[in-house]
Amino acid sequence: MELSTEHDIRKITRWLAWFAVVVLMVGVVRGRSSVGAYFKLKDSARKLDAAVAVLESGNRGMQEEIERIKSSKNYARKVLRDKYHVTDSDEKIIFFTE
C-alpha cells in the first residue's frame, strides 16, 4: 500500500508541475507581461533614446549659439537682423514691387 501512495504523490506532483508550466507559458504568451509587450517596450525605449540624443544635440547647438551671441555684439546684431528681421533705429526698409 505504501508504494501505491508514494507513486500517487509523485504522479500528482508531476501533474501539478506540468499545470504550473502551462499556466506560466500562457501568461508569458498572452498575459499583461507577455513577450510581445516586452519587445514593444524595448522598441519604444530605443525610439525614446534616439529622440533624447537628437534633443541633446540640438540643446548643445543652442548653448553654443547663446555663447556666440553673448560674446559678440556684432554676431548678436546679425542674428537679430537675419533671423528676427530687427532693424536699427536709423535704418529704413524699402519695399520694391515688380
Image (spheres, rainbow, N blue to C red):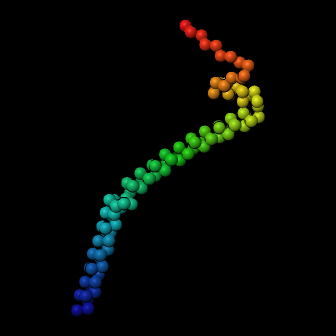
Q: Quadrant of the N terminus?
A: bottom left
Give the quarter of the image for residue 65. top right
Residue 38 point in image, percent of width and height: 42, 56
Residue 5 point in image, percent of width and height: 25, 88
- At 74% from the left edge and 36% from the top edge, which residue is drawn? 70
Q: Is residue 39 left or right of residue 5?
A: right
Question: Number of callouts in the render?
Answer: 0
- At 29% from the left edge and 75% from the top edge, which residue is drawn? 16
Above or below: residue 59 compared with residue 82: below
Give the quarter of the image for residue 54. top right
Give 52 or 12, whichever is nearer the viewer.
52
- At 26% from the left edge and 91% from the top edge, which residue is drawn? 2
- At 71% from the left edge and 18% from the top edge, which residue is drawn? 91
Residue 27 point in image, percent of width and height: 34, 63
Above or below: residue 16 compared with residue 73: below
Above or below: residue 2 compared with residue 73: below
Residue 56 point in image, percent of width and height: 60, 43
Give the quarter of the image for residue 62. top right
Give 23 or 97, whichever is nearer the viewer.
97
